[in-house]
Image (tube, helix red, strand yellow):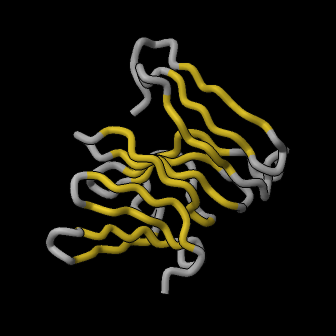
Amino acid sequence: YYMNSEGIVYHEGLLYFAAKKTQTLFILDLQAMTYESERTGIQFAGKGSFNAQPDQITMVDSYKRLIYFSEDGGSTPGVYVREKDGTYRTIFEGIDGGAYDGDETVGVALSPDRRKLYAGFQDAGVLIEFTRDDGYPFP
């Protein structure tokens, strides 16, 4: 039922995890003993496309409940964020047909001031640091 489950994070009584095969995010309310599920990347804002399999999950902002996803496979693997209202946005993604086509993004992390975002491409063995120089933190 939870085919190829990956990425799991707990926050304030809610357990989030992704099922790669079905591209589904599950949100379990462990106190109420209920759950919700949604297809990842369906409600998308801005440019980009979260069209491959969700992989690792990182909870970043407890107030907004921002969840960062890395992506397994696809022609434009990247890192995406899900906002509390269920909207997905692209943080970065590879170029279709480019060097990272079919690769997997891994290891999403933020610096303590949230002005640097770290991730990598697994098959290529590349680690990337994105730095905000506008004074604002990553969402």
Q: Nearer the viewer, residue 132 or 32?
A: 32
On the image, the x and y values in percent for residue 97 come to 82, 52
Instruction: Say which residue appears at 35% left-offset and 74% top-offset.
Output: 37
- The answer to which image quadrant residue 72 occupies is bottom right
Q: Quadrant of residue 75?
A: bottom right
Could you tell me residue 14's position as x and y percent? 27, 61
Q: Residue furthest bottom?
A: 1
Residue lying at 76% horizontally and 49% vertically, measured from the top left = 122
Q: Is residue 122 left or right of residue 12?
A: right
In what quadrant of the picture does the C terminus appear? top left
Q: Is residue 54 above or below residue 95?
A: below
Residue 45 visible at all: no
Residue at the location (63% across, 48% down)? 78
Left-right relation of 99 to 5: right
Look at the image and tell me whether residue 46 can be seen: yes
From this view, report whether residue 103 is shown above or below residue 19. above
x, y percent for residue 69: 51, 52
- Specify the quadrant of the image occupied by residue 119: top right
Position above or below: 78 against 114? below
View extreme (left): residue: 32
Residue visible at 54% across and 78% down? 22
